[in-house]
Image: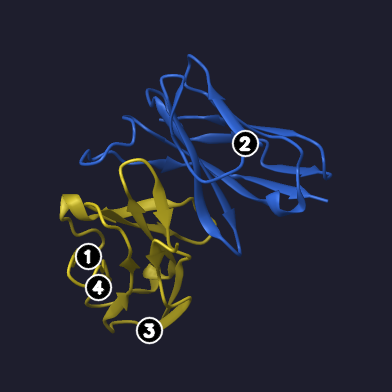
Amino acid sequence: KAGVTQTPRYLIKTRGQQVTLSCSPISGHRSVSWYQQTPGQGLQFLFEYFSETQRNKGNFPGRFSGRQFSNSRSEMNVSTLELGDSALYLCASSLFPLLAGVVNEQFFGPGTRLTVL
Amino acid sequence: AQRVTQPEKLLSVFKGAPVELKCNYSYSGSPELFWYVQYSRQRLQLLLRHISRESIKGFTADLNKGETSFHLKKPFAQEEDSAMYYCALFTGNQFYFGTGTSLTVIP
């Protein structure tokens, strides 16, 4: 079974631009979560999508948005890029939505390294 | 507010020695705790979760609600255990990760 894939793997943008990152989950997985990883803040949860609906959201500004398609592929968009948005963006897929009490493993992708100049 | 604290950024132990990676959390509800591991040049992956009460690769972790801790332990460290370890808390709608502990097992 193919793992989670993310495209592109590397991206360089300038301040003020916008960017779209893509995540293809493991076949059959319907939940996709996004995370931002930086040296200063570590791993931070952005949001989770399940069946094309955003279920959960972390503490990020509205410039960060996402969507999920009917084939479970997900995109994340960041508008009006700031220098502080430079990070590794990880996505993770799971069979079920993230729910308390449910044994449900997340599988992570390799990440997209975004650099904002 | 910091939800998950891993006090050690770096930890070195000798092969065969016991290892303990500390994790403390802050959450008033019923916590679900996890340990994730990232080996060199590999993806982040789940190591174990407290609700499964499992032992993976010789590692165990016990949730101590009184001390709000979920320390990861292994009685005899192996060289292949060298990796970055992250403790994570799931609150039912969000994941909170600690900043990670880099474990080096010295041969």
Pointer 2 indicates a residue of which chain?
A
Q: Which residue is labeled 2 in the image?
A: A62
Q: Are marks 2 and 1 in contact (CB under 8 Å)?
A: no
Mark closer to the chain start, 4 or 3: 3
Mark 3 or mark 2: which is in front? 2
According to the rendering, which colour does chain B have? yellow
**Quadrant location of the N terminus of chain A in the rendered image:** top left
Res. B74 mark: 4
Secondary element at image label 2: loop
Mark closer to the chain start, 4 or 1: 1
Residue located 71% across and 54% down the image:
A84
Q: Give x and y (percent) for residue A21.
A: 65, 33
> Do marks 3 and 2 share a chain?
no
Q: Which residue is labeled 1 in the image?
A: B61
For badge 4, the amino acid type reads Lys
Mark closer to the chain start, 1 or 3: 3
Residue located 75% across and 50% down the image:
A115
Residue B71 lies in quadrant: bottom left
* Tag count: 4
